[in-house]
Image (cartoon, rainbow, N blue to C red):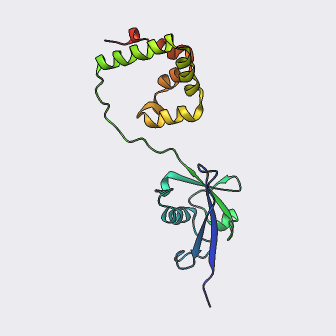
Amino acid sequence: MSLPEWHIAVKLADQPLAPKSILRLPQTELGECPLGGCSISYLKQLITGKLQESVPDPELIDLIYCGRKLRDDQTLDFYGIQSGSTVHVLRKSWPEPDQKPEPVDKVAAVREFRVLHTALHSSPAYRDAVFKMLGNKESLDQIIVATPGLSSDPVALGVLQDKDLFSVFADPNMLDT
């Protein structure tokens, strides 16, 4: 006679087009806890163990079932989670690594801002392309991800999202030299 096995479908909320991952939870992996008596924190550990590339740490995720955030100290039975249920995984905000800012070459910065300022004011096509890119949420998100510290700088984010402010701050005469 084989031991019972649970199947939990896991859906990563930040990958809506990706298919659900089916986790098979045999009784042997559940250890001492009965099938429905496992804690949510233990389920998080199992999920991160099975989906290490997508979910590296159980402390960085929240689990959602039927629209409710699951508390780590509760059990599967408490929330009515049964074999075949779908649990959604939400990533908490990832901590940004502490980085020492690199020194700025002010001469190079002034030169780059002069080029940007000239291009913005002499080429309507270039200006429109820049503002279209900054108005696109996906493009702006890519810029934020690629620029360390930008996500924690509300002033810089505001400048990037406002055409008038962007034009003013792109002026090389605004730089402290």
Tell me residue 100's x, y (percent).
31, 34
Q: Residue furthest top?
A: 173
Q: Quadrant of residue 12?
A: bottom right
Between 62 and 146, the one lying in front of the other is 146
Of the 4 image quadrants, the one containing the N terminus is bottom right
Q: Can residue 36 be seen in this view?
A: no
Relative side of 176 to 143, left or right: left
Tell me residue 122's x, y (percent).
50, 10
Q: Residue at x 29, y 16 (%)?
A: 107
Tell me residue 87's x, y (percent).
64, 60
Query: Does residue 86 sit above or below 155 in this rendering?
Result: below
Q: Is residue 128 visible?
A: yes
Between 125 and 114, the one lying in front of the other is 125
Relative side of 125 to 97, left or right: right
Q: Which residue is drawn at 34% across and 16% down?
A: 111
Q: In which quarter of the image is residue 117?
A: top left
Of the 4 image quadrants, the one containing the C terminus is top left
Q: Which residue is drawn at 59% across and 32% down?
A: 137
